[in-house]
């Protein structure tokens, strides 16, 4: 196949490009990315000069650029998104533009170019807080912040093109993902890199929020299986069963890095914070998907990657990132509490 991968220079997108070109060496990839703060050309540098790979610097909201990139492609996998809850609270408009209007542009281009397979990559956060059990694909959508609401809107718009125009769209809803090349605003890389620099690990609320952390290689394998074997019009959860709260996550990272527990700091909670996500991934498992990484293995591999690749993340944690970090955390950290005090 010739696949247009949008958001290809981001965390999961770049790992997906790597997965496709490794697991399907006869495939070709057109990688499109706007190269915002979270899109990094270094994530894909290893493919420069590979005849199976072509990079396009463009915004998914640019209909002309998207149409040109999609011409001749058999499939489309969309990772392009504004993707951080904290930033969505600061600037909701950017999230609506990319995560909803960008989807409309992609779907219209896919109609024009008669694309045969389309995957819209979404998130488990569209289900909102899941206090008990696990959310199946038919569970009610209840997003509680601008990021998850925009992702829900985008995937519903994409699925409407299946119903209205018979466009072969599928949706994946993935759990929290960790691994190489994740921008250090997200919880695991910010904890790992802060710990390496002996800086505080900011933990929202009481640190009781529960997540299922999945290695990016497993996430990519699930998305690729849906692309090749999923039924158009269907939704597929991609998640693992192991649950861990934020204090346990931070503790595990500190132990791996042999850093003191005193670096953990409880800070004022963020608005719209969901305290538990949980996915029923049996539909994807029925296609043959099984995660390879247990939580401990996924976390250790992730921590080790950041230890071995300081030249990748250290330049990022300056400039605009530092300004964002101070805006989001400085006041909270000034009024933080140690975990031991709870």
Image: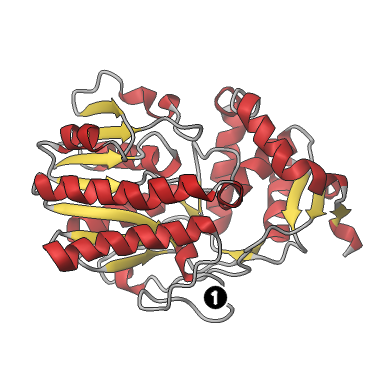
- Give the quadrant of the N terminus: top left
Work out which residue is located at the far right of the displayed protein and give it: 341
Q: Which quarter of the rendered picture does the C terminus lie within?
A: bottom right
Measured along the vertical axis of the image, is residue 173 above or below residue 283?
above
Q: Position of residue 302 (x, y in %)?
A: 55, 43
Q: Which residue occupies 37% across, 28% down?
A: 44
User: In this view of the protein, can residue 27 be seen by the observer?
Assistant: no
- Is 324 situated above or below 178? above
Residue drawn 42% across and 30% down?
35
On screen, residue 108 versus residue 147, left or right, reads: left
Picture quadrant of residue 226: bottom left
Outermost residue, top direction? 49
| Local SS, label 1 | loop
Please name the residue shown 25% across and 42% down the image: 23
Nearest the eye: 245 or 115: 115
Q: Which residue is outermost to the front?
A: 93
Q: Is 317 left or right of 235, judged from the image as shown? A: right
x and y percentages locating residue 65 in the rendered image? 23, 32
Q: Where is mark 1, residue-wise?
A: 130
Q: For the image shown, how many numbered marks are present on the structure?
A: 1
The image position of residue 179, as x and y in percent, is 50, 44
Task: Report the residue at 48% width, 77% height from top.
Answer: 134
The location of residue 154, given as percent across then percent down, is 35, 57
Closer to the camera in the image, 256 or 181: 181
Q: Residues within 10 Å of mark 1 (few under 14, many from 20)?
A: some
Give the side of residue 116 with respect to residue 21, left or right: left
Is residue 239 visible from the viewing direction of this image? yes
């Amino acid at each position: 196949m010739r696949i247009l991968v949008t958001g290809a220079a981001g965390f999961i997108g770049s790992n997906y490009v790597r997965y496709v070109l490794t697991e399907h060496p006869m495939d070709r990839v057109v990688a499109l990315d706007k190269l915002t703060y979270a899109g990094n050309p270094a994530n894909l540098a290893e493919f420069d000069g590979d005849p199976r790979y072509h990079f396009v610097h463009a915004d998914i909201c640019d209909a002309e650029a998207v149409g040109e990139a999609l011409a001749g492609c058999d499939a489309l996998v969309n990772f392009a998104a504004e993707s951080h809850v904290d930033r969505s609270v600061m600037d909701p408009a950017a999230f609506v533009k990319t995560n909803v209007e960008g989807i409309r542009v992609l779907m219209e281009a896919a109609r024009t170019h008669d694309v045969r397979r389309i995957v819209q990559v979404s998130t488990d956060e569209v289900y909102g807080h899941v206090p008990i059990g696990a959310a199946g694909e038919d569970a009610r959508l209840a997003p509680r912040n601008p990021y998850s609401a925009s992702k829900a809107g985008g995937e519903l718009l994409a699925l409407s093109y299946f119903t209205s125009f018979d466009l072969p769209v599928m949706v994946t809803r993935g759990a929290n993902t960790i691994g190489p090349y994740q921008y250090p605003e997200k919880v695991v890389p910010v904890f790992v890199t802060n710990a390496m620099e002996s800086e505080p690990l900011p933990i929202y609320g009481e640190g009781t929020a529960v997540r299922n952390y999945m290695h990016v290689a497993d996430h990519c394998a699930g998305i690729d299986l849906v692309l090749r074997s999923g039924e158009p019009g269907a939704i597929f959860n991609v998640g693992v069963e192991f649950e861990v709260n934020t204090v346990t996550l931070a503790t595990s990272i500190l132990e791996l890095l042999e850093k003191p527990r005193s670096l953990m700091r409880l800070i004022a909670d963020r608005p719209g914070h969901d305290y538990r996500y949980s996915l029923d991934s049996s539909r994807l498992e029925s296609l043959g998907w099984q995660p390879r990484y247990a939580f401990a293995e996924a976390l250790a591999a992730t921590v080790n990657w950041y230890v071995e690749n300081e030249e990748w993340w250290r330049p990022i944690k300056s400039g605009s990132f530092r300004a964002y970090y101070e805006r989001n955390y400085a006041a909270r950290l000034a009024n933080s509490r140690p975990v031991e005090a709870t």
